[in-house]
Amino acid sequence: MDFLTLIQLLDSTVRLATPLLLACLAGLFSERAGIFDIGLEGKMLAAAFFSAAIAALTGSVWIGLAAGIAASMAFSLLHGLASITFRGNQLISGVAINFLAAGLTVLIAQDWFSQGGRTPSLMGGARFEPITLPFADALASTPILGPIYAELISGHSILVYVAFAMVPLTWWILFRTRFGLRLRAVGENPAAVDTAGVSVVGLRYAAVMICGVLCGIAGAYLSTALQAGFVKDMSAGRGFIALAALIFAKWRPWYALYATLLFGLFGALETRPDIIQAVLGIKVQGALLGALPYVMTVIILAGFVGKAIPPRAGGQPYVKER
Amino acid sequence: EPALIFDLGGKFDKSFNEAAFRGAERWAEETGGTFRDIELQSEAQREQALRRFAESGSNPIVMTGFAFGDALGQVASDYPDTDFVIIDMVVDAPNVRSVVFNEHEGSYLVGMMAAKASQSGTVGFIGGMDIPLIRKFACGYAQGVKAVNPDATVISNMTGSTPAAWNDPVKGSELTKAQISQGADVVYAAAGGTGVGVLQTAADEDILSIGVDSNQNHLHPGKVLTSMMKRVDNAVFQAMSDGPGMEKGFNVMGLANGGVGYAMDEFNADLVSADMQAAVDAAASQIAAGDLAVHDYTSDDSCPALSF
Amino acid sequence: MEVMPKWAEVTLVPLISLLLAAILSALVILAIGEDPVAAVKLMVTGALGSTYGWGYTLYYATNFLFTGLAVSVAFHAGLFNIGGEGQAMLGGLGVALACLLIPWPHWTLALLGATLAAALFGAAWAAIPAFLQAKRGSHIVITTIMFNFIGAAVLNYVLVNLMRPAGSMDPATARFPEAVHLPTLHDILAPLGISFSKAAPANVTFLIALIACVLVWFLLWRTWLGYEIRSYGKSEPAAKYGGISPTAITMIAMLISGALAGMMAINNVMGEAERLVLNAVEGAGFIGIAVALMGRSHPFGVFLAAILFGFLYQGGAELALWTNIPRELIVVIQALVILFTGALDNMVRMPLERLFLMMRRGNS
Amino acid sequence: MNASDISGRQATAAPAASAAIELKGISKAFGPVQANKDISIRVMPGTIHGIIGENGAGKSTLMSILYGFYKADRGEIFIGGKKTEIPDSQAAIAAGIGMVFQHFKLVENFTVLENIILGAEDGRLLRPSLAKARKTLLELEHEYGLNVDPDAVIEDLGVGMQQRVEILKALYRQADILILDEPTGVLTPAEADQLFRILDRLRAEGKTIILITHKLREIMEATDTVSVMRRGEMTATVKTAETSPAELAELMVGRKVLLRVDKTPATPGKVVLDIKGLRVVDEKGVERLKGIDLQVRAGEILGIAGVAGNGQSELLEVLGGYATGTGVIQVNGQPLDLNGKLADGRARRARSIAHVPEDRQREGLIMDFSAWENTAFGYHRDPGYQSGLLLNNAAIRADTEAKMGRFDVRPPNPALAAKNFSGGNQQKIVLAREIERNPDLLLVGQPTRGVDIGAIEFIHQQIVALRDKGKAILLVSVELEEILALSDRVAVMFDGHIMGERLSSETDEKELGLLMAGVGA
Ligand SMILES: Nc1ncnc2c1ncn2[C@@H]1O[C@H](COP(=O)(O)OP(=O)(O)OP(=O)(O)O)[C@@H](O)[C@H]1O
Ligand SMILES: Nc1ncnc2c1ncn2[C@@H]1O[C@H](COP(=O)(O)OP(=O)(O)OP(=O)(O)O)[C@@H](O)[C@H]1O
Ligand SMILES: [Mg+2]
Ligand SMILES: [Mg+2]
């Protein structure tokens, strides 16, 4: 495998990892606050639709992004209502949100656009275009670093940079701010937060809402940056993979980056059976090739990661009075 | 009143179900008639939908997809007075019209065009789910490519092994980019909703793409080399127009009878040179006349021009 | 010391929740310009108004019973088995192999053999995640998700490359021989003088699912093994203190869970399709999660929830048949039912509890 | 400290007009349970006010209402004479109230410092808050002698330390009114003494303290006034100087209570438990037991004294079969498997070893299971309870009912879930299960932690009765008083070693206290 191929592979890794990373960080905020969220998939899908739809209608991808985020947050609010206010089962609520998003997006898309549950193709300002970083062209010919900068680092949509910037930001928020301290505390022992005079409900809603924002960006990235429009079910299970990555990452921001990059790499490798053949020396049959990322995940998980301890109050509603 | 049953992909799968729906709509528009339709949600509903429509007097009942073969085989004899039309599969019963398409022939033609349009000598194929039908597309395509340029490389990828593979444009994009980085400058997508991503990325990356099933040239004018037309719409239109008492039996829709073909319109006129078109048309008439045989993958589960 | 009488808890709460879901669904139906009253009528008569409707409702319910029980058993051991989908797929492979490779003389024997094969294959597919959880601490939620994907790939590979009859377009096995066809409810009830629709796919597997329900209940609440499973699920430190082996219970519970999920295949593969198709499970594994959660992981609750989802599936099919309501609307209705009965149930319960408390105070 | 010290000071209580805290007509129901019924109470500033009452009397509930954790159904709260609404803990903190809960409200995987600033941060950024808190903490530590490592993680700290963190939390928030809910339940005598010295200082500074405890001695020594609660009602409030332990006990339980354990001298028989060179390394690789030698004979109670966290738990866990170790342990002359297949609780029970674990809610009981299911726990595969694969539920129920009767478990309802019993009754369920097996060796950890005096009396009697049947008993407790009252011999553990063994008739709290601190031997 030559250098340029490697760069291309990594480039693809970055693109595939970005929605996973955003969703993973979204889940991280929610679950760190003690609210499990298997509705990442649904929120991402809803955001993908609304951002594409509104971008198509207004011609502005930014308004689209805002709409996607708003839609995702609306689902977050629903999840909050069910799991915080009404202390319902968080897993069921998540399952319901996934179904709801899958159904509603197509229904509304058909109602608005009559294009078979799709949005029209986005053009021009209705789409996030790749950004060429300064001097990318000038430096491209520098050996090694040039291609890395010009091909790998430069040339992604703004949302990719947002996603990667979210990693240190998330870390900083969680571990360097008052809000982060409280957020982590409420996922470990809500009673401690409550008796310290801080609202458990408020914190948890805040976390769930941040989760909505990040899922919104993830969805918008799918339909307005990677693609130029919405296709039904286009999140294609990425919310679940993000959830797996979150557990993989032991609910930590930097590990989340590594985990999603790893999943991204597996995804990228899947598109390059030629490389796998070159490395392994055997041709992997198509269907089994598709299973490769998952097999690798299991092997890595079993071999290297070990036990992941979730936030202790995770998944349980905070009930003071029986 | 005729009825139309879509396969699990649903009415709007950007593939043959959608084409079938357009055919039925055209029929409704032209004749002022109405038709029933249903999008299935589960395997068990195949037989259910067939029986329910048959019992309620719908005639003819048209269904899209090879997966109906088994159910129709069970049901057809119970409703001898109802005419059934199955697309993409052969069911041998007196009240069934089976319509199959020679996708490999159409794919052969677009493969030729891909090879002719390619500068790099490398072209790509992106399929949806890895099933024999899609391999049939890929195999015909590869034969067409090799016919023009025996040294050409055909890169073939399938999107996945679950039904999600039909609706993952993001992965379609990534596969396209991967093929581009391996040198492909024309890609042919036979992947339903996933193909949306393929065509989009090809347009973005300034290479040519080839659409499938219906004419997709307009999606990215000047970027879609052509589309492999599989006239499911015509088959449905025809079936509904023929109505009850239609001619039954085995209907092969190939190049000879316009069942498959390639799309030419104002959107790709500049991309297809006269020479290219002449060569392809020549091959088409040869195939139609039976002078040129394109191997059908599903006839023996093998492909001379491509390995899976 | 419960606030609400038990009858209210088990009837009023779910019924009012369902009503809320129905009202919201009606609004959605109205919003897309259809008649909600007619739609509900259609669903009810279509799913419950004839033996034909029941035949489909029960057929779907049978699938969900198996996957729901599977999730429940694991849940009682504190394990969240999301892998029902993959386990049911592999169960289908087991059924197909059993039915195609062995010349069964009679369906009863075939049923026994196929059930065994389905359970074995399903359990085998759960065994690796279970082992990794027990021995390596690999989170079972991730590994079972991964095994769903891997299972789909395996099935695809096997059907496309190995088990497909030569020259067939359809990535499916050959039809099973006549001898292994299972009797439908029509065949079973006819000798009893009950005429049940011939066309509906509900078959003898439904009875097996009911037996499975009873057995699971029996296992969990009448045997020491079930007792150990529940103990471990409630408190791992206590289980250790009590001399219950976490490794053994994790393995056993997951094997039982996988076996139950796998056994779904005798319904859809052997009973209905009579061959193995790629898409045989079609999400029943995931519906099983909702069914188990809504049924509070109790076999009887699972039974009711499975019937409810069977009703939604069959009622939805009828809607799709006779109206222009798109199938996504049915998905939305399912979502609303899951949401209101499963996640927002306290929205109904809290005011009800207040009401009962007031009544009780008023009485005393 | 010395009782006369305190009683001398109580006369300084201020006139009635300016009570620091006044509660009027507080009522609170949890669903059908009326936890507090029309409770009124006045606490003067600069005093220590004690509250006693049986398990479930409603003490914690009342204080949680004052702290804004629960909302009262009815009633008014006056702070410093001013009517104050306390809808949440925020308001309580603002009103100068701090509370140390019976079950600590700490974030286990946070550091001490993080726990202390939680909710009381300065500004949005953590670092300045932490720096400031570190400084303040140092001052507080200096002032009150409350030493803790600010960077230690809570889960690595013993309960005594955790309690200090809770107190520091309140002080950090500048509480004028400090509520302590059963603070000494988990402390060693030395730690308890230190706590009371601190409370004394705080009182001297004019702070008001409410102290909930089950220990009459503490009430008598530390408080100025004391209120007694029973079944949700406030039955009496008296000046401490004007009452006696016996009177309080009677007010509390509603009958006369024996305050001493009645026991005859032991007649030790053959060696039942023989431990040689026992070593245990925990999951983190830390050596917790560093070569223990111990013997317990039939008909005697060996008490293990020691500050929590010195290896007592590990000793019980190894003996109970759910921790691994090296060395030799013999029971009735036969070795126990410490590492292999038979190192599990079931095998131990088969060897006639019964175990009342230290933490009944985590290990001893399954809180969601009914009493009868809990009664079978650990013995569920014994012939009496099971045949083939089946549990004999009817037999277990009947057995449970009998045991509940004999152990006076209230309410005597086998179908009630364990979590619905009060702490003392939960403990009785565990004891009944283990003692009624008539084991050759009984392991008991913290048998009366958080249990009211009525129940303590009963539990102690049962343990002694088992000894008198000629059984060997290994008792682990952090309550020196309990160790001295129950055991025939005492071994003191410190840092994974046995610091020394004494006959309880020949030693006293002072000597043991020194051994527990690692001094002497
Ligand atoms: N959060 C709660 N929800 C429901 N019931 C509760 C709750 N907290 C306490 N109770 C009930 O209220 C009553 C009073 O409990 P409380 O904890 O105040 O007693 P206590 O006097 O502190 O007992 P202890 O000495 O055991 O700590 C008990 O019956 C208890 O079961
Ligand atoms: N408030 C409480 N009420 C009842 N039990 C408690 C309480 N706080 C702690 N415990 C239990 O008491 C035990 C004491 O724990 P700790 O670790 O401090 O002492 P230890 O068991 O002697 O030490 P180690 O296990 O580290 O050797 C633990 O099992 C803990 O769960
Ligand atoms: Mg209390
Ligand atoms: Mg301990």
Image (cartoon, grey):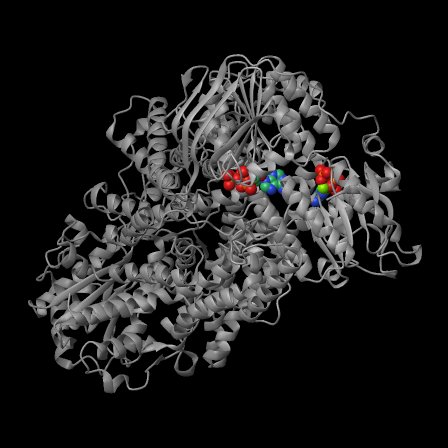
Q: Is residue A134 left or right of residue D94?
A: left
Q: Nearer the viewer, residue B185 or B21?
A: B185
Residue drawn at x 59%, y 54% is D147
Estimate the x, y position of residue D443 in percent, counting from the top left: 54, 25
Residue found farthest to the left:
B150
Q: Quadrant of ligand 3?
A: top right
Q: Who is closer to the viewer here, B49 or B170?
A: B170
Quadrant into which the N terminus of chain D falls:
top right
Q: Position of residue C289 (x, y in %)?
A: 49, 44
Evaluate whether residue D490 shows in this view: yes
Q: Is residue C49 visible?
A: no
- Tally of numbered tags: 0
Indicate the quadrant where residue D267 lies. top right
Q: Quadrant of residue B91?
A: top left
Residue C256 sits in quarter: top left
Taking D221 as reference, is B196 above or below it? below
The location of residue D184, given as percent across then percent down, is 67, 42
Residue extending furthest toward the front: D520
Vertical placement of residue C39 versus B179, above or below:
above
Q: Is residue C160 above or below residue B173?
A: above
Residue A164 appears left or right of B112? right
Image spot of residue C190 (x, y percent) = 48, 24
Which residue does the image show at 47% across and 81% down from the upper left?
A60
For the point 60% across and 34% down, which residue is it? D511
